[in-house]
Image (tube, grey):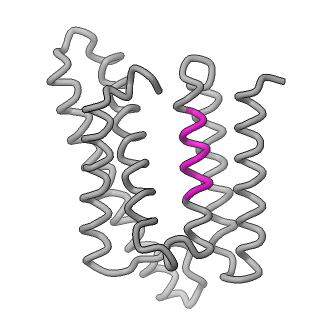
Amino acid sequence: MQPVLQAHRLLWVGTLAVGVVGVLSTGIAPVINALVGITVAIAVHRVAGATHPPYALAVSGAAALHVVGMVGGYDQLWWYDHLTHTLAGMLVTVALIWTLRAVEPSRSRVAIVGGAVLGTAAVGVVWEVIEIGARWATATLSLPAVLVHYGTDDTVFDLIFNMVGAAVAVVLRAERWL
């Protein structure tokens, strides 16, 4: 088995293990988040794993980081949410650069990068709406929260750090090495 595939599987199993352990301490949310994260990571691995193994591995790592956050990282480390949103912003920006380059190969780098950064902002806003909506729905239905919304300040910082991640991806030209 290839080392990269072994690393993916280790991250997937670790993510699921953390999610299962999280059930014992915080409820069902970590397992649900682990399953969604692993599903996304496996899909990215199948689509981009052969051509962009570091990117696919980074997505698996981001899923693992998120689930670790669900079992305490977000509550215990003030910077943890900033880290995960920065990483997510980077990964979304890189995926959008690749997508825009494939759809419009004649566009300039400035146009492609600009579109990717705007797209990352839009994805961030959609994610925050989903987070708020999921929290509202679970509270309304008296169900355990699957996603946690910490308030307006958290939303603003999440969006800022998504853009920090987008800027890091652009400055480092991460689409070349991920």
Query: The magenta stretch spans which residues?
Result: 56-65
Q: Is residue 89 left or right of residue 115?
A: right
Instruction: Return the x and y of residue 93 as percentages of the image width and height.
Output: 34, 37
| Residue shown at the point (49%, 87%) measured from the top left | 139
Q: From the viewer's perspective, is 80 left or right of 5? A: left
Which percent across, then down, holds residue 17? 78, 61
Q: Main secondary structure of the magenta part?
A: helix
Q: Describe residue 2's horizontal placement relative to residue 58 as left or right.
A: right
Residue furthest toward the top? 106
The residue lying toward the viewer, choosing from 113 and 86, is 86
Displayed quadrant of residue 44? top right
Residue 83: x and y in percent read 42, 57
Q: Position of residue 141 (x, y in %)?
A: 53, 87
Going 37% across and 25% down the picture, which residue do you hit?
99
**Quadrant into which the N terminus falls:** top right
Query: Is the residue 138 above or below the residue 162 in the image?
Result: below
Residue occupying image coordinates x 50% and y 79%: 75
Res. 40 image quadrant: top right
